[in-house]
Image (tube, grey):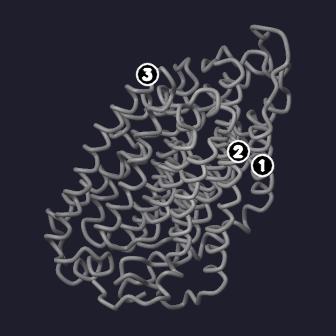
Amino acid sequence: MPTQAFQPGDLYLLSPELSMALLALLVMVVDLFTRRRLVTVTVALIGLIIPLAFSISLALSLDFSVAHRAFFGMLVVDQYAIFFQILFVIIGAIMLLASYSYVGKYVRADGEFYTLMLFSLTGAMLMASTTELISIYISLELTSIPLYVMAGLIRTSERSAEAAVKYVLLGAMSSAILLYGFALLYGLTGTTDLMGIATSIRTAFHNGNFMELVAVIFVIAGFGFKISAVPFHMWAPDIYEGAPTPATAFFSVASKAAGFAALIRVFMDGGLFQINLLSLVIILNIVAILTMTLGNFVAAVQTNVKRMMAYSSIAQAGYILVGFTASLASKSSAGDAAVLFFILVYVITNLGAFSGIIALANATGGERVEDFRGLARKAPLLSAGTALCLLSLAGIPPTAGFVSKVFIFTAAWGEGQTLLVVIALLNSIVSLVYYGRIIKAMYFDAPLKEGRIATPLGLSASISLTAAALIVITFASQVLLAIASPAANSLLAFLIGR
């Protein structure tokens, strides 16, 4: 592990994460003194400008032809880390807007809800920026522990309390599995630094190593829980259904994006693909196929929208694994650019879809598909934005979701993953069934009750912003893919010979 001494400039490299943590503390103090949700959310929204400004400043001021490492080599600032920093700030801003009315109506301790969300985002940002196993594990726990509490914050709801307990128990199990995988990697290489692990694997193991493969399997299992990949998905449906709907939306994007950010970083910068590659690709192919297939087929028979979206998020994780597998198979970051673009589109699309679900739950308390009946007559703009996001999730052309799938599948096809791509395409067709059911209910079914549904300002803003972003991404997809490419390429920058 690099042992350079601490420098004052290290704080600048840590500034996005540090400012996000300080913002979380500020929100907690403001809520303590005012107890007015409008003031608390306003402070949080304005405060997000600071970590965003620091991330943009780092992107513009640093020379990325050299490594920028800090805190004894545990923190790295590259295009990959900055990409996720900005993404997590976007998640925070949209969630603050989308959750405002719902939190005031259904959630106890609203100030604590926002504080927990900001602390979780701090951990998520660190998961993309750390290159040392212990720091990655601590960052993961900082991301996860607030989520356990957020799941149980619905007033007088036994389902919410049950969701929190299940999340804690299964989260502890997954953390133990991941930590055991990290311990095996340390035992094999003698270091917890990803660059040191990559160097050790390259020099010490030439003909494969069984224990290294076992360690990799444990790492996949540990991160598989965070990204809700099969067979580590069992937590998602019950917890998505029982948690507050804004918390469910946050789980579906922040937790998944952070899990993939760390997973890709560990495998690419840690060089875990350098040996046992064929076995690793087969394992990931199986996981990706099971994840896509189970997620889509089980989602198709759900009647509760939150459970449906839980299985939908499982299926989306399978698509991301297709691109990740393509990168490993080629021993390059070629597919990672498509993965980063897909994650960006998925985050925006899922937040928009959940904004529609939150609006319906806030107005009627309904969470079933039939509760969407006739929504287009009662809230036409809300329905239009929600429908656009659902069509994008399904991959209907020419939406941004369709473009992101084309990039992912093209990268995998180019690396010879033909069977994986064919199965992914078939699964995309299956997904039309359950996304289409919601759209049909909104536009073609008679409403259960007549009357208009008033959409709060925050929800209107979140739906409008996500819908507009999807339209822009559709037309600027090549530009955004070009922006994601340097971030993906930076993952291999520290490996010997690169």
- Name the secondary structure under disc 2: helix
Residue 495's place in the image compared with 422, above or below, is below
Q: Where does residue 396 sit, x and y in percent of width and height?
A: 71, 40
Label 1: which residue?
A: 465
The 10 Å Cα crowd at callout 3, few under 14, some 14 to 19, many 20 or more, is some
Q: Nearer the viewer, mark 1 or mark 2?
A: 2
Residue 163's place in the image compared with 483, above or below, is above
Q: Where does residue 24 sit, x and y in percent of width and height?
A: 54, 56
Q: Is residue 427 visible?
A: no
Indicate the quadrant where residue 36 lies.
top right
Q: Is residue 441 left or right of residue 333?
A: right
Residues 363 and 404: in front is 363
Q: Which image quadrant: the C terminus? A: bottom left
Amino acid carrying mark 1 in the image = Leu
Residues 4 and 183: in front is 4
The 10 Å Cα crowd at callout 1, few under 14, some 14 to 19, many 20 or more, is some
- Name the secondary structure under disc 1: helix
Q: How far is mark 3 from mark 2, CA to CA?
A: 25 Å
Question: Residue at position x 45%, y 66% from top?
Answer: 126
Residue 295's place in the image compared with 340, above or below, is above
Q: Assess whether mark 2 and mark 1 are in contact (beta carbons under 8 angstroms).
A: yes
Amino acid carrying mark 2 in the image = Leu
Q: Which mark is residue 97?
A: 2
Label 3: which residue?
A: 159
